Amino acid sequence: MFGLSEVALLLLVLIVLLGARKLPGLVRSAGQATRIFKSETRALREQDAPSAATPAAGPVVEGTVLRRDEPGRH
């Protein structure tokens, strides 16, 4: 994608535009944003994945099975 010369030129432009004092804060913010993004995508994947504790067919509901051919039913 980018070669070494393009990355070096981009860093040089950032240092000139933002100043050497603001660059570490900018890099720190970018790293923190990346960590937050990764943790949120991991949480979404875990939320969408079916859990081993719940059955695949859904919750169990207790009840009585009714049949249409039983006598006394309308």
Image (cartoon, rainbow, N blue to C red):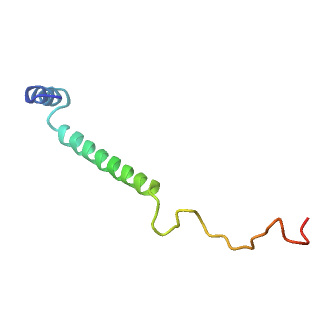
Q: Is residue 13 above or below residue 49?
A: above
Quadrant, the C terminus: bottom right
* Numbered label tally: 0
In the image, taking residue 45 as reference, residue 13 lies left or right, namely left
On screen, residue 21 above or below 5: below
Question: In this rendering, would 8 be left or right of 64?
Answer: left
- Residue 10 placed where, x, y %? 15, 27
Residue at the location (52% across, 62% down)?
56
Relative image position of residue 40 (x, y in whole percent): 38, 51
Q: Nearer the viewer, residue 57 or 71?
A: 71
Q: Residue at x 41, y 57 (%)?
A: 46
Q: Which of 60 and 6 is in front in this view?
A: 60
Furthest-left residue in this view: 5
Residue for point 68% across, 74% down: 62
Q: Quadrant of residue 25?
A: top left
- Specify the quadrant that holds the N terminus: top left
Q: Residue at x 57, y 62 (%)?
A: 57
Q: Depth check: 44 or 8 in front?
A: 44
Residue 9's image quarter?
top left
Find residue 15 and report its horizontal and vertical position in percent.
14, 31
Taking 15 as reference, is 61 left or right? Answer: right
**Nearer to the camera, 10 or 53:** 53
